[in-house]
Amino acid sequence: MDHALLVYFRCPEDFAEIEVNGRLSSDSGYFQFGQDICYGQCSGGQPSNHLTASLYDAAKDVKIEGTRLYLPFDLTQVVENLRRERYQLNSWHSLEKITGGKASRAIYYLLRPILPIAVRKHLQRARLSGWDKILFPHWPVDSTVESLMAHTVSLLLKARQTERVPFIWFWPNAAPAALIMTHDVEAAAGRDFSAQLMDIDDSYGIKSAFQVVPEMRYDAHAEFLDVFRRRGFEVNVHDLNHDGALFQNKEEFLRRVERINRHVKGFGALGFRAGAMYRNQDWYETFDFSYDMSVPNVAHLEPQRGGCCTLMPYFIGKILELPLTTTQDYSLFHILGDYSIELWKQQIDMIIKRNGLISFIVHPDYVIEEKARNVYLDLLGHLARTRADKKIWMALPGEVDRWWRSRSQMKLARAGDRWSIEGPDKERARVAYASREGDTVVYKVEGTS
C-alpha cells in the first residue's frame, strides 16, 4: 500500500494497476505530463537539467493495455521528488547562492536582534528580488501533486472503462477543506502579546497553535506554556534558538536535535517548526515529534526557495508534514508591501477548489502594530464567514495530525453493492467517488448534494 496514488486516495488496491512504460532515463530532470511540470526519470524522451519553456511532454507516451495503465515515469518517484523538493537545487538563483551562504546568514542572524524591521525588509527584498520570475513552483499556490493524482485517476478510469472509483474522503465529516491557524513567537514582544492574540482568536471562535522558541530568545517557562493549554490552544517547539543555523551541517544538526527532542518532551508538544522555514527533509528521521510545519507549498518569498507542490499533508517517514499553503504575514506586509487580505483570499479559494489544507502563519510580533492587526482582524472575519458558508474544518494542527494518521490506516471494504470504511475514527470518515466529466476529474462525497 505504498504506491503514492493509493496512499493519497485510500482507494481499493486493485484499482491502481500502474506500471512504467519502457526504460526510464538514467538521469533525473524536468519534463511535462500534460499541463504539469514533473521532476524525475522518464521514458520516451530526455528530461531537462533546467526548467525551460520547451520541456519534453511525456503524456504522449502513456499506454493502456486491457485494464492496466502504463505511465512513462514512476508516479511515486515524481511525487516524492516534488514533496521533498529534490528539484529545486537545479534552479537556485545565483543571488540567493551569494546572500544565502553560511557566512552571510551568520552575520544576518548576529545583527538581526538590533536591526529595525525597516532595515530588515530592505535587505530581504534585495535578496528575494526576482521572486516573481520563478517559473516553478507556481505562484501563489502550487497544486502539481493534486493535478498529477487527478490526471492519473482519469487515465485509470479510462483504462478500466468504469464511471467512478471510490476512495476515503480527505477530511472528517465530508468537510471540503481544512484550516489551521498558527502563530510563531519570535521575540519577547511577541511573547508578551500572545495573551492578547489568544483573546482576538477566541473572539472569532478560532483556536490556534503557538510555536515557542525554547532557548535564548526569551524565557519560555512552564507557567507561560500552561496558559495556552488551559485556554484550549496548542503549544509547539519553534526551532532551538532561531539563529538560522539548524540545517547548515549534519554534525551541528544532530547536536541540536538532541536538545530539540528534549524540549519537545519538556513542552509536552507534538509539533515543530524550524526558524525561517529552513529545512532538509532527508534529515527528519532523527526528530521525535509527531508532525512538522516547516515546508512551504511555494517558497518564493522564503529565505530557502523551493516548495512541496502539494496542498495535502504527507508523511516524511514517521513524521507528518503539514505544509504552509499561504503567504506569511511578514512577507505580505514587509516584502510585498500589501496591507490587505486579497492575496490570502485568492489563496484560500484556490486551496478549497483542490480540497486542501489552508494553513497560516501570523506572528504575534508583527501584528502588534494597529495597521497590521486590522488586516489580521479582516482575515479572521473572512475565515469565520468561510467556515460557516463552506463548512470548512477549522482545527488545531494536532487534530489534523491525528486525523491524517487515522485515515492512513483506514481501508475500504465492499458491502454488497456499497462501500464501507474500516479503521480507527471511521465514524467521521466518508466514502467519496472520483469520476470524469469531460477531461476533468471531479470528486463527490457520498450522501452530499
Image (cartoon, grey):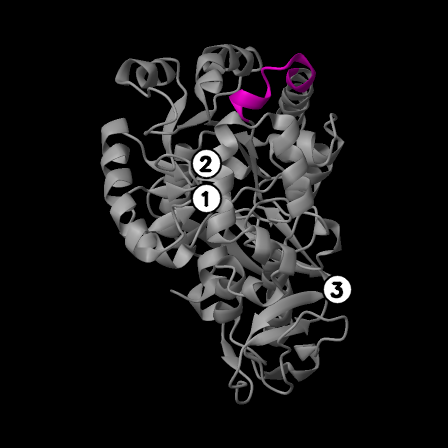
Q: Residue at x 68, y 65 (%)?
A: 36
Query: Distance from label 2 to label 1 (Cα)?
Result: 6 Å
- Please tell me whether residue 291 is drawn above or below residue 137 in the rendered image: above
Q: Nearer the viewer, residue 398 or 50?
A: 50
Res 106 label: 1
Q: Which label sits in the foreground, 3 or 2? A: 2
What's the amino acid at mark 1?
Ala
Identify the amino acid type marked 3.
Asp
Among the two numbered marks 3 and 1 on one chain, the one whose residue lies closer to the N terminus: 1
Residues shaded magenta: 363-373
Q: Are marks 2 and 1 in contact (CB under 8 Å)?
A: yes
Q: Earlier in the sequence, mark 3 or mark 2?
A: 2
Whether residue 410 is visible:
no
Name the residue type under label 2: Leu
Quadrant housing residue 118? top right
- CB-based contact (under 8 Å), mark 3 and mark 1: no
Q: Could one spot residue 423 in this view of the protein? A: yes
Asked which secondary structure carries label 1, the reply is helix
The residue indicated by pointer 3 is 439
The residue that mark 2 highlights is 110
